Image (cartoon, grey):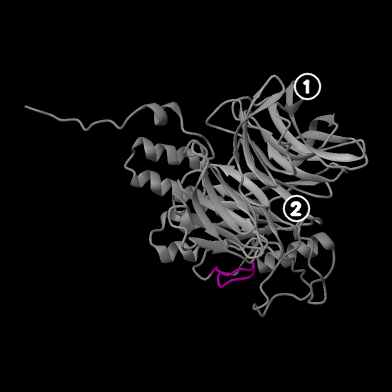
Amino acid sequence: MDIVITSLSETKDNVNRRSGQPAGNNRKYTGMAPWFPLQVDDEVPDVPRGVSVPPTLERHQPISSPRCHGRACGRCGCGALLMAAPPRAGVWLCRQPSRVVAAVPGDPGRHRFMVGTCDLQNKNQIHVVEFSEETAEVSCKQSFEIEDEVWLISPSPSDSQTVLTSGLCHSGGKSSPSLRLIRTDGSQVSQQPLALSDEDNPLSAVKTALWDPHQEGCIVVADAEAVQTFNVGGGKLSRQVTLHVGQRCMGACLDPHHRQQLSTVDDGHLKTWDLRTSRLAFRKDGVHLFGAKDVDYNPNVPYQVLTTGEDACLRFWDLRQLSTCLRSLSGGHHHWVVKARFNAHHDQLVLSCGTDSMLCLWRATSVASAPLGGKRGEEAARASDGLVRKYEEHEDSCYSCCWSSSDAWVFASVSFDGKLVVNRVPDEEKYRSGLGALKEGLRAGGRHGGSRRLRLARGGRPGPLARNHPPRAPMRLSC
């Protein structure tokens, strides 16, 4: 973020020199920085009239005087004027309806995403785009056609070149759900339709299709009536487990901490299943008014899930104690919240998108594994929970969002009109997250757990020393 600090008198002089107009309150001062307007506090009495006040500017922190505070930029007691430019977003338009964006794994240092289209009349495509942090530009690196509508994209966790897609296939005037395995090897792309080995129970409208991270070659498919697990081999899907979860299953998510366990949302119910016994382990009715839309597991806290619903709220739950909701966040969306995702490195940051075209970044300190800023105590943690920023670049319903697989601070979203937007976490929130991880590492006393938190604060992954080396025993001296 670019920050410029000048005095108010210097601002007037610079404006006059650049514009060539005499100073006066009847002039509009826009010459200080042509690429973004000035913003000043309305409460300051000596601010010139006519200064444009945009709605999206960063609030400033104390810099040269303890009186430098407030939500809007302006002249404080120290006589300084702070102007902050919001981080630029990368925008790319694929010119076809779209419902899904997914991060491409296995490519460190490069922010790559896959975008699938769902056009009823024209041939659909999958685009591989890349975001450059230096120029804030999004460029398309590869595109290939696909016969079906693409509603879901799930890259394989064990093979970055293999992707599972789900959508609708139109043939003979009928529509049917389809699953495909797509393998990209450089410029070569191969597509393999997946057919059920048992045609007695065909799939209905597929809501979720994802890979099992604990078992290679196994996928989980949630349709409108059931959740089923399959083994993929030779272009065939061998059915293993079938769970009849409800009449209107909307989504499913596998537990990253425990094998053979997943959670589903249907209507207003949250259910957790044990795939080994095909039985219900946990259940909570009425998690959202009017119905739940999505569920996601906290990657760092076992038994903690996040649900979204048609009541425009995000709710956090502990599966072992479902009688009360851990935390509820609202105020960012005004319609259905279609999807929400935890940040894999900093689980206090949550991303959500909805049919009101809004993309929201939330802070959930009270339910995080490491509270932001190292704060302790329930009251301090809950006080810092809430909306960090609302992104309004989309003009249509925003159906999908995801975090970059190569960096903890970059995320992407796509709306139904085919507009892809790549944004970054605000610097203020980034520093807050890094400070929290730093204090947690110092509190760990230099142990390997602390070094892991320090690496994750930079958006990286734990190194070999943090993974394999136990804490060193204290040295003892004897005479």
Look at label 2 and name its amino acid: Cys
- Which quarter of the rendered picture does the C terminus lie within? top left
- Determine the secondary structure under disc 1: strand
- Determine the secondary structure under disc 2: strand
Question: In the image, is 451 to the left or to the right of 158?
Answer: left
Q: CA distance from mark 1 to mark 2?
A: 29 Å
Q: Earlier in the sequence, mark 1 or mark 2?
A: 1
Q: Give the farthest residue toward the left.
A: 479
Q: Is residue 306 above or below residue 243?
A: below
Q: Kindly identify the residue that appears in the image at 66 percent across and 50 percent down.
A: 249
Q: Which residue is mark 1?
A: 190
Secondary structure mostly taken by the magenta-highlighted segment of the chain: loop
x and y percent of residue 394 in the render? 78, 54
Q: Which residues are magenta?
A: 68-78
Question: In the image, is 231 to the left or to the right of 321?
Answer: right
Name which quarter of the figure residue 70 lies in.
bottom right
Q: Kindly identify the residue that appears in the image at 63 percent across and 41 percent down.
A: 227
Q: Is residue 77 above or below residue 274?
A: below
| Crowding near the residue tagged with mark 1, few <14, some 14–19, many ≥20 C-alpha atoms within 10 Å | few
x and y percent of residue 360 in the render? 66, 57
Q: Closest to the observer: 275 or 369?
A: 275
Cβ–Cβ under 8 Å for marks 1 and 2: no
Q: Which residue is mark 2?
A: 398
